[in-house]
Amino acid sequence: MKGLHEFLVSPAETARRHGPHDRIVMSSRVRLARNLKDAAFPGWAKKPERVKILETIRPAVESLPEMKDAFSEAMDNLGALDKQILVERHLISREHAAKSSGSGLVLNREETFCVMINEEDHLRMQALRPGLQLKQAWNAIDHLDSELEKKLDYAFDGDLGYLTACPTNLGTGIRVSAMLHLPGLVLGEQINPIIQSVNKLGLAVRGLYGEGTEALGNVFQVSNQMTLGENEPAIVERLEKVLSQIIEHEENARQTLLEKKTKVVFNHIGRAYGILANAHSISSKETMNLLSLMRLGVDMGLFPGAERSLVDELFLVTQPAHLQKKLSDKLTAEERDLIRADMVRERLKNVSRPVVKPQPNTTN
Amino acid sequence: MQCSICKEKPATVHLTQIVGEKMQKLDLCEDCAKTKGINDSSGFALADIMLGLGAAQEVEQAVGADLKCPRCGFSQADFKKSGRLGCSECYKTFSEGLSGLLKTMHKGTRHTGKAPEALRVSRENSDRLKTLQKRLNKAIESENFEEAALLRDELKKINERPATTTNLAQ
């Protein structure tokens, strides 16, 4: 089998994938948690049992038509760098990256399906789509799950539904989530009340890499919290409604910034460009936060001719593992900061500094 | 009012989460609120916090700390440590203590979503049997014997069918 790096879609191509509302909604995801009937959950099972479970589940997943030519590997055969790349691509969780023997991963060619085996549950299957496509993602994973249930014996209870390791996932085992880019709400200082009201609706707001992470680059993940007592389409629809409101608030916030705080927002974007295009050493965190402002500038028409996909690609390739993968020597964080700055300067060589009069953006 | 986490300092941060008609409340002191990241802009989820405190104790009180899952050997103390269960059977073993927890955590306590195909068929069958039985009782009560006879025949037909799907439901 090919190595992970040869298998993965190139960052340039990933960044060019479009979906509805991708100005704000970077991606949609639906994940289902499933467990086998007669086995301990991964966190409690001993290693031989976990290995046995992996050996039962992996061939079943590989045999699905959706998984033709998939990348399938046991976690102990993946290096730390490869695992980190998968995390940076949002294909696996940080928790799964920490697993080794007895856990596995099956990822399809198009990177629209990714199944984690023996993460917190025996099966965590996810469907991924660019932009706002929650219904499509749900339909896709629903179908995959229905195929898989013919081959595996799931733990299911008539009253409690699909039984999961953590009671918070019980019932449908579903987590519907979208990754949102919300620089307008952050700059307009409206993000906290928005997060609070979203929380009050029983939805969770998290940072870029999920649970317990900070919102780097003004990227937030919104997802459902409750999984029992409501069916899947209702959960998807509830999240969709909330998302459409957040999108509206973000658009309004951007409009208000442009009209009432023009200097403030142009100042932020101009400085972001200035640093990115001229720095000789830059951390990944600063890069992300500045790229977020540049992305906002592209959306606002301040960079005529520049495409959003260039920013999105840089967002991915400047992250530590992606950067390290390009180089043969193992670098320290300080050395990476130099190389990162070189790379960003090079890629922004042909992007002119922001204009003062916004121009309608036709390239996106 | 005392902080619900440290049970020492006075609670000054009061959280309320409303979903549908249900309301959950949590009262925390400033320090605990900070360590739980409640002032953090990346957000928090009430269920995550609740799982870390009240939940495990609740289970303990209901079932006693010594109870162990007969299938996987998982104990109440293990749940307290990890917030995860040992196997699917644990839901039966600890069901008494879990029901309160599920009520606070979720919208309802009964699954209304997708079910594996084989179970769905048997569930539909048993639902149908139940309705037929009800109609039969009603027909007998109202002395509508003609309809009762028809219903009885229909019930008999379903019951005589080889029960391949019902086995899976067990």
Image: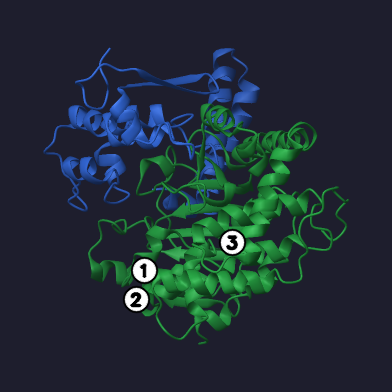
x, y (%) of residue B147? 65, 24
In the rendered image, residue A140, in percent from the top left (x then y), is placed at 64, 58
Q: Are marks 3 and 1 on the same chain?
A: yes
Residue carrying label 3: A144
Whether tag 1 and tag 2 are in contact, CB under 8 A, the answer is yes
At horizontal 44% and vertical 41% (from top left) the residue drawn is A158
Q: Which of pointers 3 and 1 indicates the residue nearer the eye? A: 1
Kindly identify which numbered label has been placed on residue A76.
Answer: 2
Whether residue A27 can be seen here:
no
Q: Can you tell which of label 1 and label 2 is closer to the viewer?
A: 2
Quarter the N terminus of chain B occupies: top left
Amino acid on which disc 3 is placed: Leu
Please tell me which residue is depicted at 30% across the width and 46% down the height of the picture: B84
Q: Residues within 10 Å of mark 1 (few under 14, many from 20)?
A: many
Q: Nearer the viewer, residue A270 or A325?
A: A270
Q: CA distance from mark 2 to mark 3?
A: 26 Å
